[in-house]
């Protein structure tokens, strides 16, 4: 009994994708290329913001958190999923599984709060351009970034701390990566409190993010309508399109995945695919979207590539 408990507490097994014969290694290498592409794009954004003085502005200091968060999310998920495709075993230490789940949920909350902070910054810049420098001071920017990460970490830590009160009696996770709903299915006893707190935390994060972004975008659009400056209108539209595209796609995929854990008739394969997409969409889209729609980043990168301005 003691040995069984020890084994149960050491490792858990992850589910895998059903891959046709002969498709394992092509999918593995395709996924590896996608991972390397996402990492290189996000590292390029981070490097440009760090090293180029023309990007040392409040907007880009807040934007800096986005590729950082994307790197955390995709690195915590994709390498393990890919290795399980070609590995004879798909086991993972339970402690590492919990850590992976914590990072993935931290990533999800980070997207919501970072995009909210960025929308607020754009609201100040477009609706109050003359007061922007006095409002978005270095101290305010530091406070905004600290609030984003502090609130995200606190809510996710609270969510995972509730798991410690429940005993674990299963060791098979019916997902290709570890997350809070999958970990809860390993527990014995009543998980009602965990489910309620989980839904409350998700709702709270969504409410804060959506409220801030809705307020900011409505104000931006009103300013866009009433202003006579065509340049300001173009700037407003580009800002809205870029961020709204990312948040809408992310919300659709994440909402489906969250709700799918509450319904038993949802295909497990579809559930796994949508779950993986949550951690691919943002790291893939963010560098491309902001590289295309943010003229300063695009022009800075082009100058670097043409060796006109050494990094």
Image (cartoon, rainbow, N blue to C red):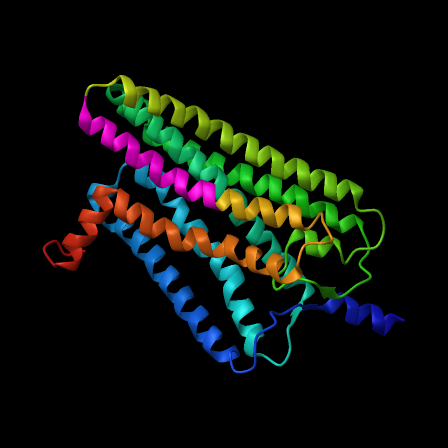
In terms of image quadrants, where is residue 100?
A: bottom right
Viewport quadrant of the N terminus = bottom right
**In the foreground, 182 or 16:** 16
Q: Position of residue 137 (x, y in %)?
A: 32, 28
Drawn side of residue 148 relative to residue 90, left or right: left
Q: Is residue 87 above or below residue 118?
A: below
- Farthest top residue in view: 226
Say which residue appears at 61% left-offset and 55% top-offset.
101
Say which residue appears at 38% left-offset and 61% top-offset.
39
Say which residue appears at 67% left-offset and 35% top-offset.
200
Magenta-tinted stretch: 229-249
**Is-magenta flag for residue 209?**
no
Q: Where is residue 79 in the image (x, y as percent from the top left)?
A: 50, 67
Q: Where is residue 68 in the image (x, y as percent from the top left)?
A: 41, 51
Q: Is residue 294 above or below residue 307?
A: above
Viewport quadrant of the C terminus = bottom left
Q: Where is residue 12 in the image (x, y as percent from the top left)?
A: 71, 67
């Amino acid at each position: 009994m003691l040995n069984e408990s020890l084994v149960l507490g050491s490792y858990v097994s992850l589910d895998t994708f059903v891959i046709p014969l002969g498709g394992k290694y092509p999918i593995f290498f395709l996924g590896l290329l996608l991972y390397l592409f996402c990492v290189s794009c996000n590292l390029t954004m981070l490097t440009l913001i760090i090293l180029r003085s023309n990007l040392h502005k409040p907007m880009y200091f807040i934007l800096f958190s986005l590729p950082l968060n994307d790197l955390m999310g995709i690195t915590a998920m994709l390498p393990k999923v890919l290795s399980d495709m070609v590995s004879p075993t798909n086991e993972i230490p339970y402690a590492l599984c919990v850590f992976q789940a914590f990072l993935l949920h931290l990533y999800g909350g980070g997207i919501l709060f970072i995009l909210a902070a960025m929308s607020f910054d754009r609201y100040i810049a477009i609706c109050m351009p003359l007061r922007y420098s006095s409002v978005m001071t270095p101290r305010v920017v530091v406070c905004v970034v600290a609030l984003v990460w502090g609130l995200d970490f606190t809510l996710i830590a609270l969510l995972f701390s509730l798991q410690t009160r429940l005993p674990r009696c299963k060791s098979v996770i019916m997902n290709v990566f570890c997350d809070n709903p999958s970990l809860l299915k390993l527990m014995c006893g009543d998980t009602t409190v965990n489910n309620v707190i989980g839904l409350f935390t998700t709702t709270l994060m969504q409410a804060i993010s959506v409220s801030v972004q809705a307020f900011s975008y409505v104000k931006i659009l009103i300013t866009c309508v009433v202003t006579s400056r065509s340049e300001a209108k173009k700037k407003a539209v580009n800002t809205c399109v870029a961020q709204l595209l990312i948040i809408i796609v992310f919300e659709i995929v994440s909402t489906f995945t969250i709700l799918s854990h509450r319904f038993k008739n949802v295909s497990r394969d579809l559930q796994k695919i949508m779950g993986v997409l949550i951690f691919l969409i943002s790291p893939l889209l963010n560098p491309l979207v902001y590289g295309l729609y943010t003229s300063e980043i695009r022009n800075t990168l082009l100058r670097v590539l043409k060796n006109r301005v050494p990094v």
